[in-house]
Amino acid sequence: MIKKRPYQETYRPQFHFTAKKNWLNDPNGLIYYNGEYHMFFQHNPSGIDWGNMTWGHAVSPDMVHWEQLPHAIEPDELGTIFSGSGVVDWDNTSGFQAGEESVLVVFYTSAGEFAPKETVYTQSIAYSNDSGRTWTKYENNPVLSNLAKGNRDPKVIWHNPTKKWVMALYLENNDFALFGSSDLKSWTKLSDVHLPDSSECPDLFELPVDGNLDHTKWVFWGANGRHFIGTFDGEHFTAESDVLRTEHGANCYAAQTWSDIPSSDNRRLQIAWMSGGKYPDMPFNQQMAFPCELTLRTTADGIRMFRKPVREIETIHERRHTWNDERLTSVTNLLDGIEGELFDIRAEIELGNARAVGFTVQGEDIHFDIDTQTLTCLEKSALLQPIDGRIELQILIDRSSIEVFGNDGRLSMSSCFLPDMTNKSLRIFASGGEARIISLDVFELQSAWSA
Ligand code: FRU
């Protein structure tokens, strides 16, 4: 039976963002300002499938509890409104600021292919002087003319050492380019970036290595999560790694990181679209992944990006079940009797002489094979190296998604699934031998829509 109350419907995710109704895809214009996380998103205001691209808008105090606001940017004669980013223009470099409030500026692609009179793809801007509640498009749009057929998805950052704005833009194939500006309105090309196997939705950001603010690296990121770790001098990005990936799930795409997180917090926060998934008979289509914190850490393989859920998940923690130092075999199921749809599970498991360990969630296996050192969830597999004979897992389970994070975020897997609504059971298992639970916490979660 389909429940009808908004945000309570059968397959409605309860702590992953969905549009109240209709289609969404990429997160856009991620800005933190005045205690609010802004998230704009690719939205079809009038259809359950992709089309009529418009920027939807939602705000949250914590990236978990969202309120959807009126649509922010609507199609015009330059085209529909494709993906892009946003910043706070603290020093009013654009001259758009009207009062005391700092001005928010967003950058988007005018998708000329879908204009009333078909034209080319260009880049445009809009600004808000009321904390993002209303938006004015710049009168001289576009700010960047067409450079390659489908060029799109401008991501703008402030580069403090060279005191200028930098835009990363997707051009075509696996090619991206960087542009510089002093006023957000006129842009000049700085350099090219080639990211093999990737296209669309670039991101460019700096991160400390192992938390050391005196030792930082830059990340250049494409829509499918492939990224380089390297250096950026304000003009050129230089890769120092192979093409890397942390995320190996079935449905993570077009992730972007928030701009203007206060230095007192200093986290690099990212949210992705969970591309795909099925939501039969639902008023909405598609969901966002759960927000993650990104860090760079030194590993035996070199510097790698770690990706793990933001700690704000704790705002919806409800009942906690805890175990320490327990035998894990094929015959006992410590989780017998715990039923539900929404969980945050955290486990550290010593592998012992077992051949496999894992969880079964509503009939779906999350399975670590010890011989091959592979973690498998919803038909996707990835390598996860045990550390001192142990693995650590965090698993977020919502209605219609399972997200698994291995070894404190060394690996992440975000996947959609269509839950069997008659099976709400949980199981933890070892097979082929005996393993040991060092620690296990199962948090039942509240819905973010009712909390
Ligand atoms: C990525 C993408 C972007 C584009 C947007 C259109 O999913 O194709 O490149 O701007 O979606 O909705």
Image (cartoon, rainbow, N blue to C red):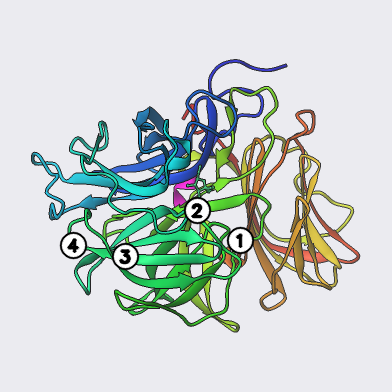
**Cβ–Cβ under 8 Å for marks 4 and 2:** no
User: Mark 3 to mark 4: distance in Å?
Assistant: 11 Å
At horizontal 12% and vertical 44% (from top left) the residue drawn is 97
Q: Residues within 10 Å of mark 4 (few under 14, many from 20)?
A: some
- What is the three-letter code of the residue carrying label 1? Glu
Q: Nearer the viewer, mark 4 or mark 2?
A: 4
User: Mark 3 to mark 1: distance in Å?
Assistant: 28 Å
Q: Is mark 2 within 8 Å of ligand 1?
A: no
Residue 340 locus on image (x, y percent):
68, 34
Residue 135 locus on image (x, y percent):
26, 34
At horizontal 53% and vertical 20% (from top left) the residue drawn is 6
Relative to 55, is 435 above or below?
below
Give yes or no for residue 310 being in the magenta stretch: yes
Task: For mark 2, give the secondary structure.
Answer: strand
Residue designated by label 1: 247
Q: Which residues are magenta?
A: 309-313
User: Mark 2 to mark 3: distance in Å?
Assistant: 21 Å
Task: For mark 3, give the secondary structure.
Answer: strand
Q: Residues within 10 Å of mark 2 (few under 14, many from 20)?
A: many
Residue 154 locus on image (x, y percent):
38, 54
Q: Which label was assigned to residue 255?
A: 2
- Identify which residue, 226 or 377, lies in the foreground: 226
Q: Which label was assigned to residue 132?
A: none
At horizontal 58% and vertical 70% (from top left) the residue drawn is 196
Q: Is residue 233 visible?
A: yes
Residue designated by label 4: 182
First in sequence: mark 2 or mark 1? 1
Residue designated by label 3: 179
Q: Nearer the viewer, mark 2 or mark 3?
A: 3
At horizontal 41% and vertical 72% (from top left) the residue drawn is 192
